Image: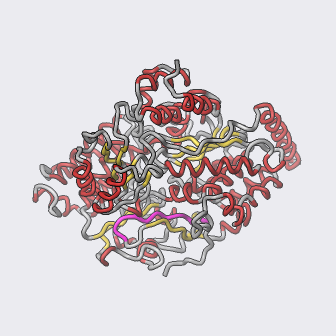
Amino acid sequence: MSHFRSDIRQRAEEAVALYPRPRSAMLPLLHLAQEQDGYLSDQGIAEVAELTGTTPADVRGTASFYDMFHLEPVGKYVVGVCTNIACLLAGGEEFLTHASKKLGCAVGSTSDDGLFTLEETECLADCDVAPVVQVNHRYVRTTTPESFDTMIDQLRDGKLDHDVPSHGTLIRVRRIGGLRASREEVAGQRTAAKAARDARAEGEAK
Amino acid sequence: MASLDAPRIVSSRREFADSFTLTRYLETGGYVALKKALTMFPEAVAAEVDAASLLGRGGAGFPAGRKWSMLRKSPISYLVVNGDESEPATFKDHYLVEHDPHQLVEGVIIAAYALQVNQAFIFMRGEFALGLERVQQALNDAYAHGALGSKIFGSEFSLDVVVHPGAGAYICGEETALIEALEGKRGFPRIKPPFFPAVTGLYGEPTVVNNVETMSNLPWIVNNGGAAFAALGGGRSTGTRLFALAGRVKNPGVYEIEMVKNTFRDLIYDPQLGGGIIDDKEIKAFIPGGVSAPWFGPELLDLPLGQDEVAGEGSMLGSGSIVVMDETSCVVRAVWRITKFFSRESCGQCTPCREGSGWIERAMYRLEHGGGRMEDLDLLLDLCDNIAPGLTWPPQQTTICVLGSSIPSSVHSAIQMFRDDFVAHVQHGGCPHE
């Protein structure tokens, strides 16, 4: 029995087929597991292991290396506030303190209603709109405490659902079709191209 | 005065709100370069890039053409694009993937054709959710347009491109760590030698890894010729470059300007660029190329924005991000935050980096937050010396990758330039700015 919903399972199998080796689909699959469950559940990890030909321990060990993967449940909205150098110079630390008060949870924890998880992030590469705030990895571009509060209230009311999907949903644009160039076609082209290039090189040498 | 008459090579569609769509891309000359390239011999395309003397835009500044030519002996198997932009205060690739994804895709196809590679991967940091969606859409559109897939535009060249999301790890910007992540593992940089993935890369096969901005330059180079590109800029720093300007300036942002013809002062103060310091305060220091680079003081504002020019003064242009600190900025707090970053992002393989970064961060923390001691200054320099012996530039390396040797840059710079600030923190029992 697959733990993944049928649509997630199908996307997972399509992802595996894009790579020469199934293990390469590890990170995309972990994102899919997180899209379904909001975090990496034991069942999700087991299914990723099955699809990548690895073990649950191996998958967990890999996932724990990466900041974006959560091994325990988090809020529907993961709010990330950057305090790295450009944001620090724009008051990022004070901003993080404000966010903690507004959300009613400490940095690294989840609000009592289970809606928000607050994280202090490293540079999110949007430094001209500092301090940078992301919600579920969408840039919300609120740089004042007031606009932050408004944004949070809108999230709570579901008004930003279109821009900010639930935590875990990363890429909403689906790849159309798998690999298009067949292996035989590629092999033929590589052989022909190499022969042509060698012939030209030989011609130059003469 | 800033020199702003050079063409915009990678940000030409900036004023269009729909710059990311295929329609706009085609209306503004998109995929013309690819069609032209497909009529040329692959090595002739590579020769144009060689003639352009295009330096890699990721941080190390290695000539892209030479990276490609190292592979001539053995056919290359994979092209991997590094879009893991994570160097603090660097946000130019972010602009390119969100606003001009087709330009990137066209550059990737051109590079793949020049290298005769039939499989490419675009590795993009996972936090770029919109960028990942825009690039995936661009790939879908390119396939439908005949620019990707089997027999591109009716030629005898086929290519598949897969966009691969990272998951939050600075170290994956290091190309061998990126390859590990692409193989589905932890992002542990590989032991060198071999130094280049061109020898042993993805799945142990010859692989070229190029940065997003490097790829994005290729359509223009094919359209206009390598010589036209090389005519811009000066010395080894040819062409234009995207500079990400951040910190205490009035107009932070991404600016494409000609290299060498402009100085740090132009970028920071020109009204059409940075516009000067917030509230017209005095500049205190600036970081010329990402937080891995040693700092500069105001006396170097007139230094040209060129790779060798910056290297000559003991730092690097790196990832092209410039961070400005002014008289209101606390340099001790800045260094503490930078070392906290390195401590968090150290992959943990090598002792000097893993242990040193945490030790330095703790010493910096107590200087900034109270409990700092005068002997901490010598301790910090000693710790830095253990990671990068001699504290020279470029640094000596005791670790597998350069993350370790990047840690001392800010610490060493700030202690040299602003020792009094550190002493004031010790005497005050914490940050006097608070």
Q: Say if A133 sits above or below B232 in the image.
A: above
Instruction: Specify whether residue B240 is painted magenta.
Output: yes
Q: Residue B361's spot in the image, x, y percent?
A: 26, 46
Which residue is farthest bottom? Answer: B1
Instruction: Specify whether residue B166 is painted magenta.
Output: no
For the residue pair B427 and B325, the one nearer the viewer reads as B325
Q: Tell me which secondary structure the magenta stretch mostly adopts.
A: strand
| Left/right of residue A45 with respect to residue A178 in the rendered view | left
Task: Decide if residue B188 is in sight here.
Answer: no
Q: Residue A139's spot in the image, x, y percent?
A: 43, 54
Tell me the residue at 67%/45% (across/down): B70
Task: Decide if residue B287 is in sight here.
Answer: yes
Q: Give the range drawn in magenta.
A: B238-249
Q: Residue B153's spot in the image, x, y percent?
A: 81, 50
| Left/right of residue B399 with respect to residue A191 in the rendered view | left
Q: Residue B292's spot in the image, x, y percent?
A: 40, 53
State how the image is colored: secondary structure
